[in-house]
Amino acid sequence: AQSVTQLDSHVSVSEGTPVLLRCNYSSSYSPSLFWYVQHPNKGLQLLLKYTSAATLVKGINGFEAEFKKSETSFHLTKPSAHMSDAAEYFCVVSDRTGANNLFFGTGTRLTVIP
Amino acid sequence: DTEVTQTPKHLVMGMTNKKSLKCEQHMGHRAMYWYKQKAKKPPELMFVYSYEKLSINESVPSRFSPECPNSSLLNLHLHALQPEDSALYLCASSQDEGGFYEQYFGPGTRLTVT
């Protein structure tokens, strides 16, 4: 069975400081992992995905995530936060053996302080 | 072009009304999805269409009726809804059904049932 735990419901950072959003997953199979961002009253935008190629995945807008199988983690990072990064972030796991069911974490709200 | 479009953006309907939500993609994707998202929650999968056939119905009440007229279009017909059905309805598409493929989301339709 697949599941995702986002360890922080809310993260607050100052503009220009690093961002770390934590995600742990559980999967019976070799998973695909994704990070999506949702700005208020908008749809979800794919930031990046991991599908068993390089363990360090680079995404859009300066975000990256590292797949660590031993720690079952897929944390999202960015070296320097921008005001426009303020949004809800979802870590998502999908097993590659069956139907395309995405298992969403509960989300982390990122606040960026000027 | 990685765009999924949804119309209308906002919809207010009474409990006796019949209305439809529309979703369109021109990326040649063969899988399309409907999600329901309540405030401050992750999206919940409702339906999956694969190659224009209903693949997954997540035990959704019959007052929601999906339709896939062709590979680019997905509709969600609404009838006799309840106030608790008020939510953001998101459409998504992916290249094919299966966890390897990332999903692209539309901006959503904000539905209010009065």
Image (cartoon, coloured by chain):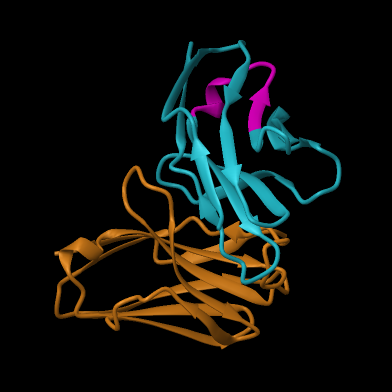
Chain colours: A cyan, B orange
Q: Is residue B14 left or right of residue A55?
A: left
Residue A111 location in percent, x, y? 45, 22
Identity of the residue drawn at 49% across and 55% down: B107
Compared to residue A88, the image places residue B66 above or below, namely: below
Residue pictured at 67% horizontal, 48% vertical: A33
Q: Nearer the viewer, residue B27 or B34?
A: B34
Query: Going by the picture, which residue comes out furthest to the right?
Result: A54
Horizontal and vertical percent for residue B10? 33, 60
Q: Is B1 one of the magenta-colored residues? A: no
The quadrant where residue A84 appears: top right
Q: Is residue B51 above or below residue A45?
A: below
Residue A113 placed where, x, y %?
A: 46, 13
Give the left or right position of residue B114, taking residue B12 as reference. Answer: left
Q: Nearer the viewer, residue A73 or B89?
A: A73
Q: Which residues are magenta?
A: A75-86
Measuring 27% from the left and 81% from the top, which residue is drawn there? B63
**Residue depicted at 65% across the width and 38% down the height:** A72
The image quadrant where one finds the N terminus of chain B is bottom right
Left or right of B97 in this view: B11: left
What is the count of numbered marks?
0
Front one among B89 and B61 = B61
Whole-percent x and y of residue B71?
64, 83
Q: Nearer the viewer, residue A57 or B91?
A: A57
Q: Quadrant of the C terminus of chain B?
A: bottom left
